Image: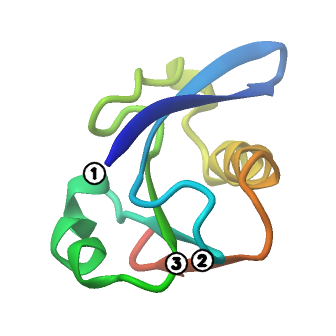
Amino acid sequence: MSEFNLEAIVNNVRISVSCRESSPGFGPTAIFLHGWFDSQKTWDLVVSKVNNCNAVTIDFPGFGKSWPLPTAMTTLSVYSEILTQVLEQLPKPRYVVAHSMG
């Protein structure tokens, strides 16, 4: 799996999101979103079984390898805006797999 960061800018704050992908450029992109108090590692077993697409996992800000947000920005609407910007940077077609907060 390759690791990389994607950036989003919300309320003039640059936010870096840690990502991993299994097969860059291979098939559609499946983005796996973790739940609250979790990280992209939640999906390791599932992603190891996915062989017909490029599986991408992310760490939301404040989880796993992503730096936390300023306290005033820790809202679901900010996380939603970050996710929208991150998704726009990933190849199409793309599908989202999520649980809990994801």
Q: Which residue is mark 3?
A: 53
Q: Which mark is residue 96?
A: 2
Q: Which mark is residue 94?
A: none
Please name the residue that numbered disc 1 is placed on. Answer: 39
Which secondary structure, mark 2? strand
Q: Position of residue 55 (x, y in %)?
A: 46, 67
Label 1 neighbourhood size at 10 Å, few (<14), some (14-19), many (20+)? many
Are the residues flagged by discs 1 and 2 in contact, CB closer than 8 Å?
no
- Which numbered disc, 1 or 2, marks the residue closer to the eye? 2
* Lower position in the chain sequence, tag 1 or tag 3: 1
- Whether label 3 touches label 2, CB < 8 Å: no
Point out the tag, 1 or 2, that comes first from the N-terminus: 1
Q: Amino acid at mark 2?
A: Val
Residue type indicated by callout 3: Cys
Q: Quadrant of residue 66?
A: top left
Amino acid type of disc 1? Answer: Ser
Question: Mark 1 and mark 2: span between their CA atoms?
Answer: 16 Å
- Image x and y of residue 58, in percent: 45, 49
Mark 3, other Cα within 10 Å: few <14 / some 14–19 / many ≥20: some
